[in-house]
Amino acid sequence: MKSSSTIRAALAAAAAAWSWPARAQSDAGIPRLETRGQATQLVVDGRPYLVLGGELANTATSSPDYMRPVWPRLARMNLNTVLAGVSWALLEPTEGQYDFSLVDEALQSARANNLRLVLIWFASWKNGISSFAPAWVKADQARFPRVQVQGGRSIEVLSTLADASRDADARAFAALMRHVRETDGARHTVLMVQLENEVGILGDSRDRSPAAEAAFAGAVPAGLTNYLAAHAGRLRPQLAERWRAAGARASGTWAEVFGSGPATDEIFMAWHYARYMERVAAAGKAEYPLPIFTNTWIVQPEDHGPGDYPSGGPEPHVLDVWRAGAPHIDLNGPDIYLPDFTGWTARFHQNGNPLFVPESRGDAQGVANAFYAIGREAGIGYSPFGIDNPGRLAALRPEGAQGPAGRIEDQPLPRGYALLRELSPLILEAQEKGTITAVSLDPVRQKESLALGDYTVNFDLRRNFRNPAQVPPFGYGLAIALGANEYLVAGSDIQVTFSPRSPGPPVAGLSRVEAGDYRDGKWVRGRVLNGDDILLDYHLAAAAAENQSGSGLKFMAGAPTLQRVWLYRYR
Ligand code: DGJ
């Protein structure tokens, strides 16, 4: 007689053999990142998808009662995707015993409100700290060692050098992904997963626990040095300079290969976070291969060095280290609350790293950010933080902006998302073709001219007609080339003119301008704009001297609006 374990093994093998073709078939349609033309896009159910997202407060999903009124409100705010936390501590309160009830609750509520989800795996680290690890992990420092900082004290941060912590996290993450596949593999409510949250060491530039000290004194792993050699011409400048300054060595200790100092400590930590998270990501993807990304606490202006900001996190200057160490992580995204949104998005959208902004502002400036990320940097999507708290939508508004209107639907973000949502098919097609651009302007950067199709599109902050020096606190715009002489422009508080880029008559005139909307993928025109609607400057001779007609598109303050324009040329 066969033992029960032999029978179980035989049944499992038979089940695996049977389920394989079905699994392979269903895997074909699961959300994935795909390079399509000039952009890398998130593909859901076979079609590109633009994430108009919002991230919940860290612990919002721990209380279904708290979330009950929130879900329908998020749908009314025109979000299509919610970034929702999953706590390791609540998922695995006892080692090896999983409680998926909160995940199921979020899945059902999202579906009931026609929303998709991006799950955030708050596990080994959340803003560097290990507070979301289960109590059985926190309490067992011998099995799950902590980071030690200078002076020998330990902090509440799991060390990346501990295989037991990594494997425990990976087991729980694999269980989560298995559960998502089993419950959502045919529905695709869950689109992506953020692995951990803003990792890195705060308070020191590197881990100084015994295991970390030993690793730091040892050789740089060949996985990293080989990557540097193979990508030598394409590395980000700071890392490349450090490596070359130390002799571009193919082997050696960390100090030999990169020199000594906090910057090398940061590279060392980046490698070890990447390796740890690579194993966790790979374990999850073996169960269900959704796209996986990380988010970054970016360097703040007052920071002096790594450790003031989380050391080892996927900052742009060490992204190559992350790429080398964590190939199962599909992208690294920035959390941008700082003013230089345009600079940070450019720094992250480099070297094959597609842009997704998992955290940022949700006020009117946030709408400008969303337009810019999606229109200028081919962003996969945008997601303001604290989306369950309506106060946050207005709390960060710049001085001078109008106060929030009464209904949530009338706030800047829901109105901005409404427009981006109706334009999504056009935007995604234009990202693929490279026929889209965008600007985010302010009194410091008041104008920007960008080549798009056969014309240069000149964006400018909207000028006061009588006092052109008077400009609004910010303005933004997005343009799509629809045809040879035809553009669609969306914007707020800007004015737009065009300049021909090809040989021929040098002035672009407006043949026709329509205000309107896209409804169900079709342009529905409103007013045909003319006269005061398009007049920028009565000084026609001065305009002519600059190959301008004196007319252009004008977009008022407040929620963004759409105009479609047909151009002609004259001399
Ligand atoms: C950034 C973190 O990633 C979020 O989880 C949250 O703590 C916000 N900061 C708070 O502003």
Image (spheres, rainbow, N blue to C red):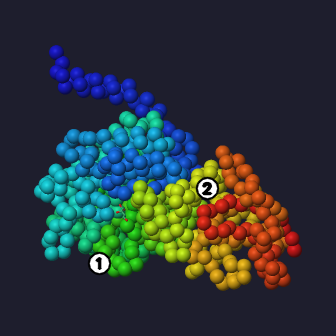
Viewer-nearest residue: 487 or 167 = 487
Q: Amino acid at mark 2?
A: Leu
Mark 2 neighbour class, 10 Å CA radius: few under 14, some 14 to 19, many 20 or more: some
Residue 270 in which image quadrant: bottom left
Residue under pointer 2 = 419
**From the Cβ of disc 2, is ligand 1 less than 8 Å away?**
no
Q: Quadrant of the N terminus?
A: top left
Location of ligand 1 given as a quarter of the image: bottom left
Question: Where residue 402 appears, x then y in whole percent?
Answer: 55, 70
Is residue 52 shown left or right of residue 203? right
Viewer-nearest residue: 241 or 47 = 47
Q: Amino acid at mark 1?
A: Gly
Residue under pointer 1 = 261
Residue 563 in which image quadrant: bottom right
Asked whether the residues under the numbered discs 1 and 2 touch, taking CB atoms below 8 Å apart as contact, a structural biologist would say: no
Question: Where residue 418 appears, x then y in whole percent?
Answer: 58, 54
Viewer-nearest residue: 390 or 119 = 390
Q: Residue furthest front?
A: 406
Q: Earlier in the sequence, mark 1 or mark 2?
A: 1
Residue at screen point 42% across, 52% down:
83
Residue at screen point 68% across, 62% down:
489
Residue at screen point 39% across, 64% down:
296
**Residue at disc 2, secondary structure:** helix
Query: Which numbered marker is on residue 541?
Result: none
Is residue 309 shown left or right of residue 438? left
Q: Nearer the viewer, mark 1 or mark 2?
A: 2
